[in-house]
Image (cartoon, rainbow, N blue to C red):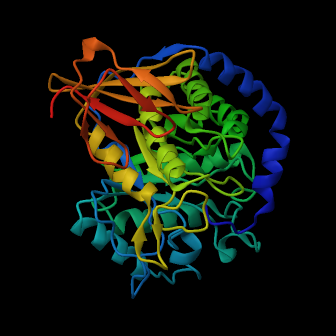
Amino acid sequence: MRRYAQTGREVARTVAALLTLILAVAQTSFAMSETIQPPNAVIPSSYFGLHIHHLNFPVPSTPWPNMPVPEWRLWDAAVAWPELEPARGQWHFERLDLYVSMAQQHGTRMLLPLAYSPQWASGRPEITVAPKNIEDWRNYVRTVVSRYKGRIQAYEIWNEPNLGDFWIGTVDQMVALTKEASEVIRSTDPQAIIVSPSCTAEWGLPWFLQFVQKGGAKYADVVGYHFYASPPSAPPEAMLPVIRRVLQIMAQNDLGSKPLWNTETGWIKPAQMESDEMAAAFLARSYIVAWAAGVQRFYWYAWDNWSLAIVTYKENERQVTPAGQAYKVIEDWLVGAVMEDCVESSDHTWICQLNRSGKRAWIVWNSQTNRKFDVPSSWRAKAVTPLLRNRVALTGSTVDIGLVPSLFTAQK
């Protein structure tokens, strides 16, 4: 999400205004009262991914996060094609070698986007165009995948091709690049996972539909998408209509058996968080509702990028923020549990029920306001754990809830 040009994203937002209004109607309809039926599966550790930008070589400016990082997407990490091969045949793998070594040390799996064209390959100053010679693209993919066979587990074709910031070309050209990369990857490292180009937000839906209808997604094992909420200050639940539309397009085009990954989401400026607690709440609720809606992997953007609206680690202060703490907490709450249902009531109170080896728990929040919540007696809840606080015993049947999720448990 590093901005080589900032105007394209803003133009896309303006052009998409009408579509945003249409989806707002869908969001309003959803908010009245509805039950989401989550996947009937244990939430795996692989659901949780991060972007980490500033593990700089040779001297890191960001330490490795002090928590499990099951998955790592290497975007905005200075390892795109122009940085790996700035001149034909002159490869610079030092930084990527370091990243791969660090990931192996921490048991972290990696997703590497294959993207951008060096000027020598495109003949143009923009890195967001297709290479002139498809064999240069094949050689790039083959060289990278051969070097990291078995050590980089997944490859994503390009990044946000529906935005001019990242792709100046046609859908047909992207289908061709995806097909060629897929053939090279499958012949070089058959175990590697191939992720389709990831469009972003609701304004990426028309491009995604074209790509799918032209057969591009059939070359991938996984459908990728970036479920940024829109408008930028919208709450996490605003992702839900877009997730549903992507899944609908997949089902209508015989792609329903493929996993759906959210390979990038965070809150970027001009969005602003009213407080550290709200930032933490947005991060936690994102992971909750995305899993409930059918997303099987979610890479948060980003761990150590302080220019965003939600900051998880402050490099200058060497400090994990409340939002960063929330990442670890929500990981602990979800991994290993089955989410049995997720319900929003007419007053915007959300209840998502978890089952961990027969022990049930409930995550509760209100997406709009603080209010009183009557704890159902059938839960036999004994304790409540607010997202950023310690667990406390329940002393009555009514508690205060709000934007920040709390976990209700039946046992200590």
Left or right side of 32 for 47: left
**Image quarter (top left, top right, bottom left or bottom right) of the N terminus:** bottom right
* On screen, residue 196 above or below 239: below
* Up/down of 302 relative to 409, above or below: below
Q: Position of residue 236 (x, y in %)?
A: 56, 38
Quarter holding residue 356: top left
Task: Judge left or right: residue 143 versus residue 247.
Answer: left
Point out residue 28 in the picture as x, y percentages from the top left corner: 68, 21
User: Residue 77: horizontal and vertical position, in percent?
Assistant: 50, 70
Q: Looking at the picture, does residue 366 appear above or below residue 106?
A: above
Left or right for 121, reference 344: right
Q: Is residue 144 visible?
A: yes
Q: Nearer the viewer, residue 37 or 220?
A: 37
Please name the residue shown 51% across and 76% down the image: 84
Does residue 38 lie above or below 87 as drawn?
above
Q: Please identify the quadrant where the C terminus is shown.
A: top left
How many numbered marks appear? 0
Foreground residue among 293 and 194: 293
Q: Could you say which is closer to the camera, residue 157 or residue 406?
A: 406
* Relative depth, front residue between 314 and 294: 314
Image x and y of residue 267, in percent: 60, 52
The residue at 56%/48% (across/down) is 178
